[in-house]
Amino acid sequence: MVRKPTSKETARKPNMREAILAAAEELFATNGFNAVSVRDIAQAAGANPGSVTYHFKTKDGLLLEIYRRHCGPMNLRRSELLAAARRVRDLQDRLEAIVRAYIVPAFTSGSDLTGGGARFTRLRAVMSAEGNEVARRIIAQTFDDTSHAFIDAVHESLPHIPRTDIVWRSHFLLGALYYSLVTPDRVSRLSRGEADGNDAASAIEQLVQATVAAFQAPALDQAAPARRRAVASSKT
Amino acid sequence: MVRKPTSKETARKPNMREAILAAAEELFATNGFNAVSVRDIAQAAGANPGSVTYHFKTKDGLLLEIYRRHCGPMNLRRSELLAAARRVRDLQDRLEAIVRAYIVPAFTSGSDLTGGGARFTRLRAVMSAEGNEVARRIIAQTFDDTSHAFIDAVHESLPHIPRTDIVWRSHFLLGALYYSLVTPDRVSRLSRGEADGNDAASAIEQLVQATVAAFQAPALDQAAPARRRAVASSKT
DNA sequence: TGATCTTTTGTACGATAGTACAAATCACAT
DNA sequence: ATGTGATTTGTACTATCGTACAAAAGATCA
């Protein structure tokens, strides 16, 4: 309330634009896009509703800007980690490094803008569930490259697994990742307090371990077909 | 338009109440709760908005009734399949049967009411992402029993894995399951048309295969700790 | 047929949504 | 200090939301 703003900041508050972005990110990530009003965001940011319109024009524009802020840094970090992972000699270690390169940036900040990539990843999870049109467009054109690079890298480590299977399994990975960020309390509840769903480090290790094993599972075509439907075919 | 309604059906339409339920289920599952208005639902069902209020009192009441309709049959079916799975002799086969008992009812109809449990499962996925309060209450008190039974059964098949790890991995399973139903097109897109994300049979087989392998992964504590953070620790 | 109950319709009300816009306020160069 | 451009505020407009409620319509049975 007292400090003099730098010459770059012409606003009254240190940076109202950033405050609005942070508030919107938090509210969207926890309540979804439609449940949050522009007024909610303004209030959480200590701003006036009109100020949101001034900076971002529309509510969609606000969401768009949130994506613009994070997508670049996050994918850049993923690329770096993936490149490093590809250079790992040992095949088992390499696969784990690749998986880690995909997962870690989703938890730790994809950028250092607001202090947590987990929040943005959760936002993406919620937007994808809501079928948000703005998010869908951005994701398809921004994340598909990264996803393909990831899938290719995994495929190189596991040449005997059909690409189709790897796509499915990486899809499962993303779903598990999203869900862990969306409903962490469920883990704490079901484990009766023995595990903390909100602990990012645990989530990452558990996710890496489980995912590596899933990728290494035998290919579907090669799995003994006689074994399947041993049960669970009663009357569906 | 011509047939005489049975004595049980006093309504003009064969069953307007069911039509509203089906429409709401579909719309909520694809667009989320908040994005769909009562008027949207009424129009999709060919009903009057006031008719929704008459049958379900409030919008929340409508959602509540959808859950009431499906939860019972779905969990019943899961229990049956789980009981059968527990009787499987071979340990590997048993684990697969257990996993299948959890997954299959989520795709095939949990009830035969409206022709697809997948739609209801997708609805649950979306509600959990939106943090819907009504859904949260119902889920915690209706699905936790089933989840615990499932976790216990898996734990019995894999006694050397800590329960905590099993909770995490079953959490990942649910996330993968949800995401497969929420964004099936992403699978088709990333596999460049080689896989069909909307094919329930494929999704089930892929999910079973990957999940069984994930459950069978070594326990986290037992995993060689030296191997971890081989990469991906640059500066986070 | 007429009485009665259930269901559907039509309309309306208050609340809140997103957004536009003019006035007020600020930081800052001159 | 003063003018100027950037930002914030306050307010208002229209649309749509969930819901209530009375009237209309249909079904059921004496």
Image (cartoon, coloured by chain):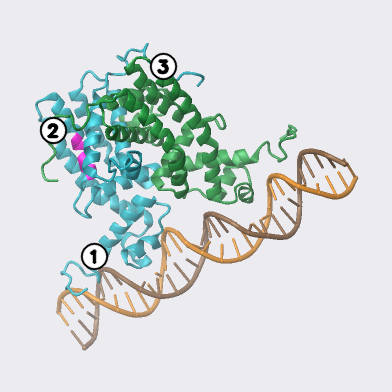
Chain colours: A green, B cyan, C brown, D orange
Task: Residue D21 in the image: state x and y as whole percent.
Answer: 41, 70
Residue name at image x 10 percent, y 30 percent: B87
Residue name at image x 35 percent, y 17 percent: A93
Amino acid of disc 3: Arg
Q: Quick check: is A114 in the magenta stretch?
A: no
Callout 1: helix, strand or loop?
A: loop
Instruction: Tell me the chain of label 1.
Output: B
Q: Which mark is residue B229?
A: 3
Q: Start and end of the magenta stretch? A: B100-107
Q: Is residue B229 visible?
A: yes
Amino acid of disc 1: Asn
Q: Which mark is residue A225?
A: 2
Callout 3: helix, strand or loop?
A: loop
Nearer to the camera, B157 or A188 = B157
Q: Is residue B132 visible?
A: no
Instruction: Find residue A88 and report its image quarter.
Output: top left
Question: What's the CA distance linking mark 2 and mark 3?
Answer: 37 Å
For residue D3, above or below residue A3:
below
